[in-house]
C-alpha cells in the first residue's frame, strides 16, 4: 500500500507487479466499505456545468429534483448557454458562505481526482461534498444509469477470480488501474499511481491500439451514441478505412448520427452503415430507456420496445469492435462469440457500468481469446471510464 495522503486518497509511485497487486487487492477487500448511495432530501447545489453537468440536470428532472444554485469556474460563459439560462449559475467566489454551510454540493466532474477536488472545495468553506454518481445510485428506480454502484463483500472464490484477472493483464499499468477501479467502488477512495496516470485523451485509441490500425479496418461501433467515437476513429486513421458500422437504438441519437453523416464528404459517408437494433445474447424485442443521451440503454422499466439481435446474426465482419452499452456489454459479447472467433478483431469494451467489470467480463474474454494481449485503462475518475482492450497477437505489437 502507498502513502495515505488523505482519508480518501492513497498514492503510490510505482505500478505493481502481479504479486504486489494481489496483496493490494487483499488490503482493499479487508478494509471497511465506503459510504452508500446518497439520496437528496432538501436544497442542494450542483458543481460543474460541463458534459456531465448536463446529464446531471437531465437526471434531476427524472428524479424531480432541482439545484438551488449551479457552481462553475466558467460561470460567465455558462450563463449564456440556453440550457443553463433558467438556473442560477455562480462562480465559486460568488457563493455566499451561508450557502456553503447549508447546501450539500453535488459534484458533476469526473475529469480530475475527486478526492483532491473535494478537499479544495472543503477548504473553500463547503461542508458536504458528494459525487454525482453516489446521488444517482439512490434513484436507480427512475433513472437507470449505474456508474455509482457500490461493491459488496467478496467470497474466496470471487477474490480468486479477481486475482486471476490481475495476473492476466499484459502490463502493470493495467493492474494499477484495475486496483484503482476496485478501490473506488469498494472504499470510495482514490488510489492514485504516479506511474499509471488516468488517460483522459485516448479513449478507444490508446497508443497500443492506434499503432496497430491499418487502412482497411472495419470499425464496429456498438453503442455509437451520436458518432463521437466514429469521428475519433476517422481522425486516427485519416479517413483510410474500409467501413464503419454503427449500432444505435436510441431514435434521437440515431437522428443526430444521420445528420452528422450527411455532412461528411460522399467518399467518406458511403463507407458508413447505421443499424438501429440493440445487441444482446438473443434476438427478439426488449424494453429500452431512451432519450438519456449516451446513457440510453436496455432496461426493464424502459418505456420503448426495441428490436435486439446478436452480432452473430448479422453480416458484420469487424476488425475493430468497440462496445459501450451501459452494463450490457457482456450480454452483447456472448451474442458475438462466433464472430469474434472468426474475425479475431481488436476489442475495446467498457467495464465500469456494473460489478461484471470487476472480473466476470474480463475473465470471460481472457478465457476465450487465445493469443491476445489484454489491457485495462482508466479514462476518467470516480470509478468510471474503465475500458478493456484486447489485441490479437497476429496484429503485432508496434510499441514493443
Image (tube, rainbow, N blue to C red):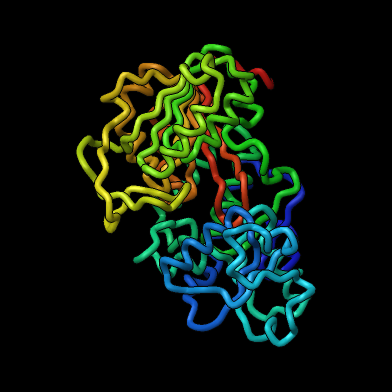
> Can you say whether 159 is above or below 280 in the image?
below
> Can you say whether 358 is above or below 239 in the image?
below
**Who's the residue at 54% across and 69% down the image?**
34
Residue 307 in the image, given as x and y percentages of width and height: 25, 38
Q: Is residue 340 visible?
A: yes
**Who's the residue at 64% across and 19% down the image?**
238
**Who's the residue at 63% across and 78% down the image?**
128
Left or right of 22, for residue 121: right
> Can you say whether 16 is above or below 4 in the image?
above
Q: Tell which of 397 and 47 is nearer to you.
A: 47
Q: Is residue 27 visible?
A: no
Left or right of 269, for residue 98: right
> Which quadrant, please, contains the C terminus?
top right
Left or right of 293, for residue 265: right
**Who's the residue at 62% across and 81% down the image?**
103
Work out which residue is located at the far left of the displayed protein and give it: 284
Q: Tell which of 241 and 33 is nearer to you.
A: 241
Count the labels in the image: 0
Residue 316 in the image, given as x and y percentages of width and height: 36, 20
Residue 26 in the image, given as x and y percentages of width and height: 55, 56
Residue 221 in the image, given as x and y percentages of width and height: 45, 31
> Which quadrant, please, contains the N terminus?
bottom right
Q: Tell which of 350 and 375 is nearer to you.
A: 350
Amino acid at each position: 500500500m502507498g502513502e495515505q495522503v488523505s482519508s480518501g486518497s492513497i498514492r503510490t509511485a510505482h505500478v505493481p507487479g502481479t504479486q504486489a497487486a494481489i496483496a493490494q487487492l487483499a488490503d482493499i477487500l479487508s478494509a471497511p466499505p465506503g459510504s452508500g448511495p446518497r439520496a437528496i432530501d432538501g436544497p442542494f447545489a450542483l458543481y460543474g456545468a460541463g458534459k456531465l453537468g448536463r446529464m446531471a440536470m437531465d437526471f434531476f428532472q427524472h428524479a424531480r429534483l432541482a439545484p438551488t444554485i449551479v457552481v462553475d469556474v466558467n460561470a460567465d460563459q455558462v450563463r449564456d448557454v440556453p440550457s443553463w439560462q433558467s438556473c442560477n449559475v455562480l462562480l465559486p467566489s460568488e457563493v455566499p458562505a451561508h450557502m456553503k454551510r447549508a447546501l450539500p454540493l453535488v459534484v458533476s466532474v469526473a475529469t480530475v481526482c475527486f478526492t483532491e477536488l473535494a478537499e479544495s472545495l472543503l477548504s473553500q468553506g463547503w461542508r458536504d461534498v458528494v459525487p454525482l454518481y453516489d446521488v444517482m445510485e439512490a434513484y436507480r428506480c427512475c433513472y437507470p444509469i449505474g456508474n455509482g454502484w457500490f461493491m459488496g463483500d467478496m467470497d474466496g472464490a470471487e477474490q480468486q477470480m479477481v486475482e486471476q484477472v490481475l495476473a492476466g493483464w499484459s502490463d502493470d499499468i493495467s493492474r494499477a488501474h484495475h486496483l484503482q477501479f476496485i478501490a473506488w467502488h469498494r472504499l470510495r477512495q482514490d488510489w492514485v499511481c504516479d506511474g499509471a496516470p488516468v488517460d483522459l485523451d485516448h479513449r478507444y485509441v490508446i497508443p497500443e491500439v492506434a499503432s496497430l490500425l491499418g487502412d482497411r479496418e472495419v470499425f464496429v461501433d456498438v453503442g455509437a451514441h451520436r458518432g463521437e467515437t466514429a469521428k475519433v476513429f476517422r481522425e486516427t486513421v485519416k479517413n483510410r478505412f474500409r467501413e464503419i458500422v454503427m449500432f444505435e437504438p436510441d431514435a434521437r441519437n440515431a437522428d443526430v448520427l444521420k445528420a452528422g453523416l450527411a455532412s461528411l464528404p460522399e467518399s467518406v459517408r458511403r463507407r458508413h452503415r447505421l443499424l438501429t437494433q440493440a445487441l444482446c445474447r438473443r434476438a427478439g424485442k426488449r424494453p429500452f430507456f431512451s432519450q438519456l443521451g449516451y446513457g440510453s440503454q436496455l432496461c426493464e422499466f424502459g418505456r420503448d420496445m426495441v428490436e435486439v439481435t446478436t452480432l452473430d446474426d448479422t453480416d458484420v465482419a469487424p476488425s475493430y469492435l468497440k462496445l459501450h452499452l451501459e452494463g450490457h456489454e457482456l450480454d452483447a459479447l456472448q451474442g458475438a462469440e462466433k464472430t469474434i472467433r472468426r474475425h479475431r478483431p481488436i476489442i475495446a469494451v467498457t467495464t465500469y457500468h456494473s460489478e461484471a467489470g470487476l472480473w466476470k467480463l474480463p475473465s470471460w474474454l481472457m478465457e476465450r481469446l487465445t493469443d491476445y494481449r489484454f489491457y485495462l485503462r482508466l479514462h476518467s475518475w470516480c470509478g468510471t471510464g474503465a475500458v478493456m482492450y484486447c489485441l490479437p497477437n497476429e496484429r503485432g505489437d508496434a510499441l514493443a
